[in-house]
């Protein structure tokens, strides 16, 4: 188990460069990922073929939008039109989670620059879903969400277009629509899910997302851009977001959790091992000195250890986290400082007290070994086996501490550690079942939790194995 | 009629390294009022014999056979419950090694002595308390000792308490396993005197287990010498202590430093054998000063002894130059000489080396023949079987007693 | 550089560090003990005065070069403490301690480094007498490394020689073993070899064989005797076993409750024990004799006294068969030489 983890810890930093971590914190890097998507393999449990994300990149990139641009001059007025087309094939059994369009536009100061978006369906229907005025110029993108249920998106325009189209097709009427999707002050109380209508079989069942059947086949975007200067231009890309992604799913920002998972490993290991090593080694040496020299030194160290044992580490860390910004290295240092003396000191001291009484120690004094030599060369090697076991068993404690802190939001906000992911998940109510997520967003919780548990168990087993090796030998003596 | 007649008792344990032959066919008979001392080095199987008699067996028993005839009845046939009621503690009780240190420190002494009564006999507490005080009195402890805790007592007093515990159910046989090992010389004498007295007043038979021959002679009517799980000699104290029949007994007696004589103590070279792999033939032959051809030297042992001779200061120059030795079965081995003359010459040199050294290095006596073959010399060793116990009431297992020559 | 002196191998370093560097010994005795006292303060809690445990209470003796003095006593007699005090693992509470004529009573550890070469000890318990974590060659190397004797090659040679002296042959085989691979007797041999590494003049053997099997004991004690004869080392052999003391020492001292009660040549003391305690001790030990079971052996009543509050006057008087009230319970007996070289501390012995 441990071997696998170590392998991971070593390989990940080599192959996945650090900028992955930076991109973790950059929302722009994840725009092509569906948000809150379950892992792809989980569709096995649903029995349905779940939609993957379909990308239609910009014109100029492979598989990109088809673009035709015409610019002409009539009566001293330049008219530029760009028509962009793309299509995708949809074969899944469930609807996409979101549909978004991104356009980069170049336009002058003239008002009236406009885009028109048309949606083509496999059953031959084409719906004029919305019009919009681009607001930002290239290189920035204009984002249009067809399914985002806020009034600011064109989604409201889309809903209305859909309503008109459905009424026109005699699938419903105004009364029914208003009854199903009431509006108060123009705000939909229970907005329709655009994708179930845009992509559902055209019959009455289309009105209810639960009953709407997916219409499989080729869908298309047709975008018309009308501008009024010679340099006007437009390019578009669209993403039809699936509901599943990757091996570990995504979180609420669309970030691939596999990255977090893999990156969490070396962080957890490094943190845990470094912390455990430092703290246990320091405690061991102090405990050994305390036991061997006895007297005032012993009293001093032991009382300090008593004091430390009473201090509640986690609450203090929480306090510090609230008051100061805690980077991960700082957390480590604080934990080690809190771990200079502790239970290990006492355990080691009692081992040393025992070994001290053994006759070869006395014999060593009789052939002139100095006290320091005896301590470091004769006694500590007897203590070391215990120390290794203790290190192995302390690593999980450190990992948990870091995970707890990150979970509470007080850890390093930059690093995608497992605790951090869990904290995000908790904050988003990942474990609560909802209509959209009947099992909660289980993958969001499962993978980081599994990571922590796996690592912890691996170290606990290692410590246990150490123990088994050591104890029989000592009983022999 | 003997109060205890042990016949062919066998106890083998199962361990990772193989079967441990802790008790390997031990037989002796004890008359009422008689004491037998079982004497041997540590690890020889004496304590295991006691455990076997009292059926105090661990979980990994491989073989447990034989007849334990107590008061005319073979108690090996009893089931666990019967054995517990009739034999254990009631007919035969035991004072364990280091028992005084295993007294329960949290229970008063009187309670611990009374416990077997309450457990075995359902005697009520007051009656049991009285009997406990009586038992303590028999071992020379005053009545108010019963109210004390073990840590308040000295080593000698604790040992007396343990003896009282062994006597509480009025057994006929008491097994004493090193009852004085952790005690001072004076206290030891006092305890032995107590045991001598109790033997008479309580009509007890003892099985006295010890490694100390001097102590054994304080109580023993009969002496049994235990070696590698076997009884190699058993006979009357007058005989065994004075003119022992078995070479091991002789060596053991010679190794006791005597306070009242000037004889320098001798020592037995080597170490007791591993009970998982006892030597073939007579188990003592590797260390025996008078071993000869019937004693059971095997080819691998022979080879190892030759190797030792090659390193020893005294002999390394004289051993004929050997390149390699291999065992061919249990009784034969092949020696390849260093290419230095013919094989026949080497065989000659070997034969004369054997003749010259066989009195000092007894293993050489086991050679039956030395034959020169094509490139090697084949050495054949005498066949051997383990010696039986030869003799009647005083018997020892040694081929020397069978009238065979040296 | 290796130098021989008087048949014993020395290294150049050894000649330099001893403060009084001389070619001939200052006194015939390697160890002299004069009115030695070693008391331990036992604390009795915060509010009670501490009490003294008088482990060694006015002991005077001397050990000559190349001889074995056995100190025999029951447990609790103070003999172990006496041994440790003599090689200065403990500091005497009172009295004088001389080694090779030099006063070492109150010197510090640093000043006593030269003593740490000349005086060695062999502990009692084969299971803890040698460091279980080190292989044998390392155990034997340590004294040499600490005293900076020789380079690696010379140390290796010394290790092999030492293993041969204690009959652990072949030495190469044993040098790489760890203690748990060896038997009790073999471990004690390693402990003995370790004591020999620095060419000592004096060895404290504290019950070196009492935890070994009977048959192994004799071989180890014989080995110690051989080593003594070969290297001229003086031994202080502490034991409770009078019989082994008889066969393996030159002189014997009997200790009771922190005091020396009788001392003299072994044959003399054991042939004619003058102190009632020695007499009782001797009659309490059985030799293997079938007649023993027919008689009751004489034994002393009672127990050895506590060292915290020993009896007044002669410590033995409560158990003594010939004690005279008014004398023995009041006055401490002095050591008197009643036979040549044979001293007794008893008012009534003669």
Image (tube, coloured by chain):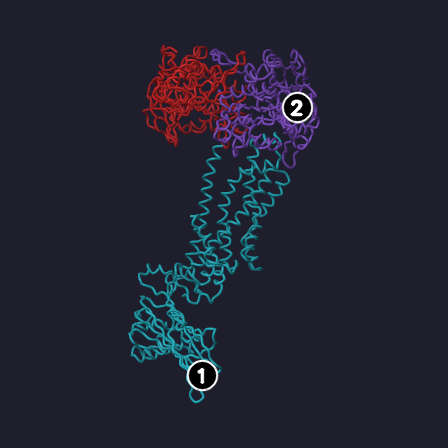
User: How many marks overall?
Assistant: 2
Q: Mark 1 points at which residue?
A: A228
Q: In which quarter of the image is the C terminus of chain C?
A: top right
For residue B233, say whether it is visible: no
The purple-coloured chain is labelled C
Give the chain letter at badge 1.
A
Residue B297, position as x, y percentages in the image? 38, 19
Colour chain A appears in: cyan
Between C340 and B148, the one nearer to me in the picture: C340
Which numbered mark, 1 or 2, is in the foreground of this view?
1
Q: Mark 2 points at which residue?
A: C57
The red-coloured chain is labelled B
Q: Are marks 1 and 2 in contact (CB under 8 Å)?
A: no
Q: Say which element carries label 1.
A: loop
Between B170 and A281, the one nearer to me in the picture: A281
Q: Distance between the residues labelled 1 and 2?
A: 118 Å
Give the chain letter at badge 2.
C
């Amino acid at each position: 188990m441990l071997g696998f983890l170590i392998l991971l810890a070593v390989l990940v930093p080599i192959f996945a460069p650090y900028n992955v971590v930076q991109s973790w914190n950059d929302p722009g890097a994840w725009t092509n990922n569906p948000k809150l998507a379950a892992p792809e393999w989980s569709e096995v449990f649903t029995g349905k073929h779940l939609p993957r994300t379909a990308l239609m990149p910009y014109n100029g990139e492979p598989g990109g939008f088809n673009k035709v641009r015409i610019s002409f001059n009539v009566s001293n007025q330049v008219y530029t039109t760009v028509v962009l087309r793309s299509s995708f094939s949809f074969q899944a059994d469930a609807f996409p989670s979101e549909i978004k369009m991104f356009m980069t536009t170049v336009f002058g100061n003239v008002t009236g620059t406009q885009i028109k978006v048309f949606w083509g369906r496999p059953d031959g229907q084409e719906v004029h879903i919305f019009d919009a005025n681009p607001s930002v110029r290239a290189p920035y993108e204009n984002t249009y969400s067809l399914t985002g249920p806020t009034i600011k998106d064109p989604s409201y325009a889309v809903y209305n277009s859909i309503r008109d189209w459905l009424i026109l097709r005699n699938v419903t009427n105004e009364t029914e629509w208003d009854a199903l999707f009431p509006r108060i002050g123009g705000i939909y109380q229970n907005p329709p899910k655009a994708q179930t209508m845009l992509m559902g079989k055209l019959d009455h069942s289309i009105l209810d997302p639960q009953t709407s059947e997916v219409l499989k086949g080729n869908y298309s975007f047709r975008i018309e851009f009308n501008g009024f200067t010679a340099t006007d231009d437009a390019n578009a890309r669209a993403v039809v977001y699936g509901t599943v992604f990757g091996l570990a799913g995504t979180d609420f920002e669309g970030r691939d959790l596999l990255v977090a998972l893999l990156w969490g490993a070396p962080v957890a290991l490094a943190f845990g091992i470094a912390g455990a090593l430092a703290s246990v080694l320091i405690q061991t040496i102090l405990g050994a000195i305390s036991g061997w020299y006895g007297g005032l030194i012993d009293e001093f160290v032991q009382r300090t250890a008593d004091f430390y044992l009473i201090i509640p580490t986690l609450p203090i860390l929480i306090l510090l986290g609230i008051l100061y910004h805690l980077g991960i290295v700082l957390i480590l240092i604080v934990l080690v400082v809190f771990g200079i003396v502790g239970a290990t000191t006492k355990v080691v001291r009692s081992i040393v007290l025992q070994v001290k009484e053994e006759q070869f120690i006395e014999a060593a004094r009789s052939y002139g070994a100095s006290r320091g030599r005896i301590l470091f060369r004769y006694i500590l090697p007897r203590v070391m086996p215990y120390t290794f076991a203790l290190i192995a068993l302390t690593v999980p404690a450190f990992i948990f501490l870091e995970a707890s802190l990150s979970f509470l939001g007080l850890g390093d906000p930059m690093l995608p550690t497992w605790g951090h992911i869990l904290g995000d998940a908790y904050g988003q109510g990942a474990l609560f079942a909802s209509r959209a997520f009947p099992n909660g967003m289980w993958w969001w919780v499962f993978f980081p939790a599994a990571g922590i548990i796996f690592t912890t168990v691996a170290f606990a087993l290692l410590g246990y194995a150490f123990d088994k090796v050591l104890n029989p030998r000592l009983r022999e003596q | 009629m003997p109060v205890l007649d042990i016949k062919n008792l066998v106890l083998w344990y199962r361990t990772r390294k193989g079967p441990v032959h802790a008790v390997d066919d031990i037989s002796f008979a004890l008359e009422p009022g008689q004491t037998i001392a079982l004497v041997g080095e540590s690890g020889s199987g004496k304590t295991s014999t006691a455990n076997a008699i009292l059926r105090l067996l661990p979980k990994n028993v491989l073989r447990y056979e034989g007849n334990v005839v107590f008061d005319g009845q073979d108690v090996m046939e009893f089931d666990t419950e019967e054995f517990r009621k009739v034999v254990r503690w009631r007919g035969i009780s035991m004072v364990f090694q280091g028992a005084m240190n295993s007294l329960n420190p949290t229970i008063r002494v009187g309670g611990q002595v009374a416990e077997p009564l309450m457990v075995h006999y359902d005697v009520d507490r007051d009656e049991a308390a009285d009997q406990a005080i009586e038992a303590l009195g028999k071992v020379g402890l005053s009545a108010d000792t019963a109210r004390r805790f073990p840590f308040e007592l000295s080593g000698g007093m604790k040992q007396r308490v343990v003896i009282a515990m062994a006597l509480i159910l009025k057994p006929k046989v008491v097994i004493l396993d090193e009852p004085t090992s952790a005690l001072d010389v004076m206290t030891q004498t006092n305890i032995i005197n107590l045991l001598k007295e109790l033997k008479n007043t309580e009509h007890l038979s003892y099985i006295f287990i010890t490694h100390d021959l001097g102590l054994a002679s304080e109580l023993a009517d009969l002496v049994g010498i235990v070696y590698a799980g076997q009884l190699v000699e058993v006979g009357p104290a007058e005989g065994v202590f004075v003119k022992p029949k078995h070479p091991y007994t002789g060596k053991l007696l010679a190794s006791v430093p005597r306070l009242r004589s000037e004889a320098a103590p001798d020592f037995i070279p080597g170490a007791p054998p591993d009970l998982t792999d006892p030597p073939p033939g007579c188990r003592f032959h590797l260390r025996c000063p008078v071993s000869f051809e019937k004693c059971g030297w095997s080819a691998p042992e022979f080879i190892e002894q030759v190797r030792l001779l090659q390193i020893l200061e005294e002999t390394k120059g004289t051993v004929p130059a050997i390149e390699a030795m291999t065992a061919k079965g249990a009784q034969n081995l092949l020696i390849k000489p260093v290419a230095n003359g013919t094989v026949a010459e080497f065989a000659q040199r070997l034969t004369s080396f054997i003749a010259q050294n066989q009195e000092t290095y007894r293993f050489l006596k086991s050679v039956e023949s030395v034959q020169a073959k094509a490139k090697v010399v084949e050495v054949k060793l005498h066949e051997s079987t383990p010696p039986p116990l030869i003799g009647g009431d005083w018997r020892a297992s040694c081929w020397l007693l069978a009238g065979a020559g040296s | 550089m290796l130098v021989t002196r008087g048949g014993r191998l020395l290294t150049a370093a050894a000649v330099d560090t001893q403060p009084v560097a001389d070619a001939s010994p200052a006194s015939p005795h390697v160890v002299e003990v004069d009115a030695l006292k070693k008391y331990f303060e036992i604390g009795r809690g915060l509010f009670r005065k501490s009490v003294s445990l008088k482990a060694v209470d006015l002991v005077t003796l001397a050990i000559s070069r190349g001889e074995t003095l056995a100190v025999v006593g029951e447990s609790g007699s103070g003999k172990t403490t006496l041994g440790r005090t003599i090689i200065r693992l403990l500091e005497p509470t009172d009295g004088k301690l001389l080694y090779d004529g030099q006063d070492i009573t109150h010197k510090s550890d640093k000043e006593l480094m030269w003593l740490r070469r000349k005086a060695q000890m062999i502990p009692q318990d084969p299971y803890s007498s040698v460091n279980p974590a080190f292989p044998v060659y390392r155990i034997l190397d340590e004294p040499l490394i600490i005293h900076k004797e020789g380079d690696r090659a010379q140390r290796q040679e010394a290790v092999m020689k030492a293993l041969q002296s204690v009959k652990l042959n072949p030495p190469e085989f044993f040098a790489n073993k760890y203690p748990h691979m060896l038997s009790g007797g073999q471990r004690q041999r390693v402990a003995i070899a370790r004591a020999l590494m620095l060419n000592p003049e004096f060895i404290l053997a504290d019950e070196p064989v009492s935890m070994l099997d009977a048959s192994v004991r004799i071989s180890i004690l014989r080995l110690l005797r051989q080593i003594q004869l070969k290297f001229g080392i003086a031994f202080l052999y502490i034991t409770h076993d009078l019989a082994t003391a008889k066969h393996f020492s030159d002189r014997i001292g009997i200790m009771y409750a922190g005091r020396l009660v009788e001392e003299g040549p072994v044959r003399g003391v054991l042939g004619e024990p003058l102190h009632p305690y020695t007499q009782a001790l001797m009659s309490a030990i059985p030799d293997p004799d079938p007649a023993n079971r027919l008689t009751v052996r004489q034994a002393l009543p009672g127990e050895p006294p506590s060292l915290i509050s020993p009896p007044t006057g002669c410590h033995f008087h409560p158990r003594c068969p010939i004690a005279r009230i008014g004398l023995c319970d009041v006055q401490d007996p002095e050591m008197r030489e009643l036979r040549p070289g044979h001293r007794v501390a008893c008012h009534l012995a003669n």
